[in-house]
Image (spheres, helix red, strand yellow):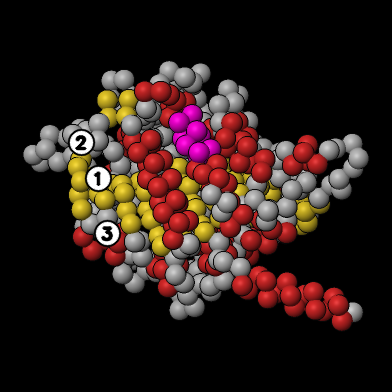
């Protein structure tokens, strides 16, 4: 007994002495749930991300915070941005001794007061906006590219993007920036936070010469292949430097694939309905992978048991048997059924470092570490917002739409369609339809494509909606609305990022 207590105390001491882990967030732009081989993409052109998934954990039910006017959405004409009163992850990590770098798109405001180095980052290489253009350099100058405080050039002029061939070297530049930063931090023994927010999969999509024409999927696929290759190099670099076991890496995307740009300039949302800009699954469910060698337990897929509300209640880890060698077990995809949100990455990163989230405000995200490290399931709903409106809610496997809207008749009549080839009568509506009194209810396990609403008269509908109504009421009662910064969003729908 005494030995066990001593062992526990030693373990606690060892953990408290261990260097805090580095955090790497890989945030894709408009990449869809169905774009990765590990998520079933048929051409299987993402070997490195699939390997990352086999060594880490795949989240199948991970969501972005918004499909349209995301907090990271700031076209050139919008003058709003991140407020000083908001506390960003790098600000908190900095106090804990981290060096923080953002590579790629910032998108939280382009005016000086919104600069990332004023909001906790120590280094920046990238741009405040999308790589739209080229512009005429009179009324609209090309979008600038920064190194830290200094503007070092502009897209199209100094950082070339050939819209005819799709050739641009930007992903290679962003990769080298990441490798150099990691090497520098490792050499100085400083913990780091790297936010790699690249944008090759956002239209106009691009790839470097070496990758052009190498995908079955055209230029979009070339962009994905280059990103996949780059992520493989980043992970191998961490391993080569011997810091992979002390670096938590999370991969996801900022919203669903932009089907208005597909198939040449947009990706795939797999079986899910519609795409970017909508609150159907295709707009908000994201590919997501957690990777932390030596910490995320190897050995078999996690399976969940579901209750009558479709809530996953426990994860079961199949026991290893003699039929499998250890190496084969390590290659079995570990899948979590935890409902996750990109907002959880704030709370989870703080938890990794041993910090508490700020207590003076409402925090929407939860700590995913119990789900990642112990295979636990935390009961929580997911809310789907478009602008200020709660459009839908997911509880367990059920999703109730309180509002439906794909895009306006006006846009649709001009050939703009957020749900090409996917009309579901009464669901993909071109006017904003309210269903608050009788929400449209789907079972996402049996019907991931949201094609078959449950009958209002069924016992299943009645029972599930009674439970969901309580969740929604509680959410509305406790909601603290933020101050909108980007409320010219509708005007800018077609130039959103
Ligand atoms: Ca995006």
Name above or below for residue 363 compared with residue 211. Answer: below
- Alpha carbon of mark 3 to alpha carbon of mark 2: how far? 21 Å
Residue that badge 2 annotates: 158
Q: Determine the residue positioned at 31% across, 49% down.
A: 125
Residue that badge 3 annotates: 115
Q: Determine the residue positioned at 28% across, 47% down.
A: 127
- Alpha carbon of mark 1 to alpha carbon of mark 2: how far? 9 Å
Q: Which mark is first along the chain, 1 or 3?
A: 3
Q: Where is residue 225 in the image (x, y as percent from the top left)?
A: 49, 29
Is mark 1 in CB contact (under 8 Å) with mark 2? Answer: yes
Is mark 3 in CB contact (under 8 Å) with mark 1? Answer: no
Which contiguous range is marked in magenta? 225-233
Q: Position of residue 202 (x, y in %)?
A: 38, 36
Q: Where is residue 131 in the image (x, y as percent from the top left)?
A: 28, 38
Residue that badge 1 annotates: 145
Is mark 3 in CB contact (under 8 Å) with mark 2? Answer: no
Q: Position of residue 76 (x, y in %)?
A: 23, 47
């Amino acid at each position: 007994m005494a030995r066990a207590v001593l062992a526990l105390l030693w373990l606690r001491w060892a953990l408290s002495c261990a260097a805090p882990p580095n955090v790497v967030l890989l945030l894709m732009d408009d990449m869809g749930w169905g774009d990765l081989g590990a998520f079933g993409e048929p051409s299987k052109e993402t070997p490195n991300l699939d390997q990352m998934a086999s060594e880490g954990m795949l989240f199948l039910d991970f969501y972005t915070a918004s499909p349209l006017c995301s907090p990271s959405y700031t076209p050139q004409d919008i003058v709003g941005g991140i407020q000083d009163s908001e506390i960003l992850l790098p600000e908190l990590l900095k106090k804990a001794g981290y060096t923080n770098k953002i590579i790629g798109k910032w998108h939280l405001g382009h005016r000086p007061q919104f600069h990332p180095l004023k909001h906790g980052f120590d280094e920046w290489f990238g741009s405040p906006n999308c790589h739209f253009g080229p512009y005429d350099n009179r009324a609209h100058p090309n979008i600038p590219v920064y190194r830290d405080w200094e503007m070092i050039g502009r897209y199209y002029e100094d950082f070339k993007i050939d819209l005819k061939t799709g050739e641009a070297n930007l992903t290679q530049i962003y990769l080298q920036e990441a490798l150099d930063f990691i090497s520098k931090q490792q050499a100085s023994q400083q913990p780091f936070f790297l936010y790699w927010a690249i944008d090759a999969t956002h239209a106009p999509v691009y790839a470097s010469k070496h990758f052009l024409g190498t995908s079955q999927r055209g230029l979009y696929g070339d962009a994905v292949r280059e990103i996949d290759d780059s992520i493989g190099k980043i992970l191998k670099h961490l391993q080569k430097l011997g810091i992979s076991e002390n670096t938590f890496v999370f991969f996801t995307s900022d919203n669903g694939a932009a089907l208005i740009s597909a198939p040449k300039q947009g990706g795939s949302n797999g079986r899910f309905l519609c795409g970017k800009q909508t609150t159907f699954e295709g707009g908000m469910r994201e590919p997501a992978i957690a990777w932390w060698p030596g910490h995320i337990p190897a050995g078999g897929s996690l399976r969940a048991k579901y209750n009558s509300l479709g809530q996953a209640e426990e994860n079961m880890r199949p026991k290893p048997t003699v039929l499998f060698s250890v190496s084969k077990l390590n290659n079995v995809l570990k899948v979590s059924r935890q409902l996750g949100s990109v907002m959880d990455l704030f709370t989870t990163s703080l938890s990794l470092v041993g910090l508490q989230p700020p207590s003076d405000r409402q925090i929407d995200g939860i700590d995913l570490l119990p789900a990642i490290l112990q295979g636990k399931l935390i009961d929580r709903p997911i809310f789907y917002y478009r602008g200020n409106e709660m459009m839908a809610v997911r509880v367990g496997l059920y999703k109730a739409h309180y509002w439906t809207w794909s895009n306006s008749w006006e846009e649709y009549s001009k050939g703009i369609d957020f749900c090409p080839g996917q009309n579901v009568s009464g669901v993909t509506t071109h006017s904003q339809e309210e269903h608050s009194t009788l929400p449209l209810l789907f079972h996402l396990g049996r019907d991931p494509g949201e094609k078959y609403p449950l009958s209002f008269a069924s016992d299943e509908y009645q029972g599930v909606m009674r439970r969901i109504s309580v969740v929604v009421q509680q959410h509305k009662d406790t909601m603290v609305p933020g101050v909108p910064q980007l409320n010219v969003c509708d005007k800018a729908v077609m130039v959103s990022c």
